[in-house]
Image (cartoon, rainbow, N blue to C red):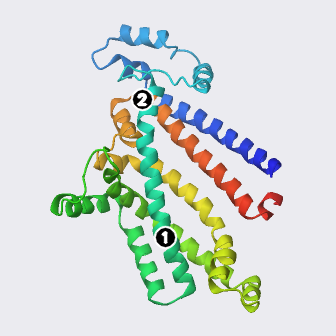
Amino acid sequence: MLIYSLKRLGVALLVAFAVSMITFALLRFSGDPAAAMAGEAATEEDISYIRTHYGFDRPLYEQYGRWLGNALQGDFGQSIYLKVPVAGVIAEKAPVTMKLGAFALTFALVLAIPLGVLAAIRPNSIFDRVALTIAVVGQALPSFFFALIMIIFFGVTLRWLPISGSASWKNFIMPSIALGYYATPAIMRLTRAGMLDVLASDYIRTARAKGLRPGVVLFKHALRNAIIPVVSLSAVQLGFMLGGSIVIETIFSLNGLGNLAWLSIQRSDFEMMQAIVLSVATFYILLTFLADLLNAFLDPRIRVG
């Protein structure tokens, strides 16, 4: 297990390094940071001074090396628009996005796994058809449109839930459902397919022949093996949720990383955008790394492979 963990950790670090390098290069190629910092009313002399003062006139690899060295120490530079350290702003906004992602994934798992198991136990039944309907609607309904429907019905018409802000847990109900429902179909289909495959295997028939209770066979033997690919998919889906939370946070006025990213794009705040992309990518890489370790714990054959 230790050797497997070290191998996966090495891969994760290489991916994080590649993401940081690509992100840095793409943002530098997308515009002139000196011109963005100087503002629209700046003269060529002002832009030239900023370019020299901040080192934007140096080769790209030198700029990247200096930025990476500072980033490894927790210094992501200063926001061009807010004029404050980027790390502090991200630390302030990240908990909101993390809460949203955790609640959304919890909603998706609580809805998808039971429906997937029921659909596998009784294929072509009413449970299977309900699961299929939920999957089709979840894939066809854009999350932003679903969010607007919930705002009109639950927020404006019934006045059950707040439609903006992040003051209490109630503010996260509709955003979490809107964001998590999009991930539900993939998790549910994978759970159903895994359960169908496992329930048809020889060791399940043997367990039933030995007289084990149906609940023990279903949850202890079948679901434990069928859930392995769901763990990896859940990590991927959570990463997608964090990366795609920009729309949901904007709709519900959640003051998290997604909303901050949208504002940073509008303001051409290169330092902030760069740190946000790297932070979300690093968290996504960490999730996949932890999912690999959990899969290896659940199935020892993965460590050997």
Position of 42 with respect to 26 (left or right) is left
The amino acid type found where label 1 is placed reads Ala
Element under label 2? helix
Q: Dot 2: few (<14), some (14–19), or many (≥20) neighbours within 10 Å?
A: some
The residue under the point 36% across, 11% down is: 44
Position of 265 with respect to 298 (left or right) is left
> Percent position (x, y) of residue 13?
68, 39
> Percent position (x, y) of residue 296?
74, 58
The residue under the point 44% across, 73% down is: 135
> Percent position (x, y) of residue 115?
49, 76
Element under label 1? helix
> Percent position (x, y) of residue 271?
46, 26
The amino acid type found where label 2 is placed reads Val
In this view, 192 is above or below 290: below
Toward which corner of the image does residue 35 lie, by quadrant?
Answer: top left
Q: Dot 1: few (<14), some (14–19), or many (≥20) neighbours within 10 Å?
A: many
Which residue is tagged 1? 112
Please, which residue is most extreme toward the left here? 157
Position of 109 with respect to 8 (left or right) is left
In this view, 262 is above or below 46: below
In this view, 109 is above or below 278: below
Between residues 37 and 16, which one lies in front from this camera angle? 16
Between residues 121 and 185, which one lies in front from this camera angle? 121
Instruction: Measure how far apart labels 1 and 2 are at the Cα level.
Output: 35 Å
Tell me if label 1 and label 2 are in contact, CB under 8 Å: no
Whichever of callouts 1 and 2 sits on the residue coming sooner in the sequence is 2
Which residue is tagged 2? 89
Look at the image and tell me in which quarter the C terminus lies. Answer: bottom right
The label shown at residue 270 is none
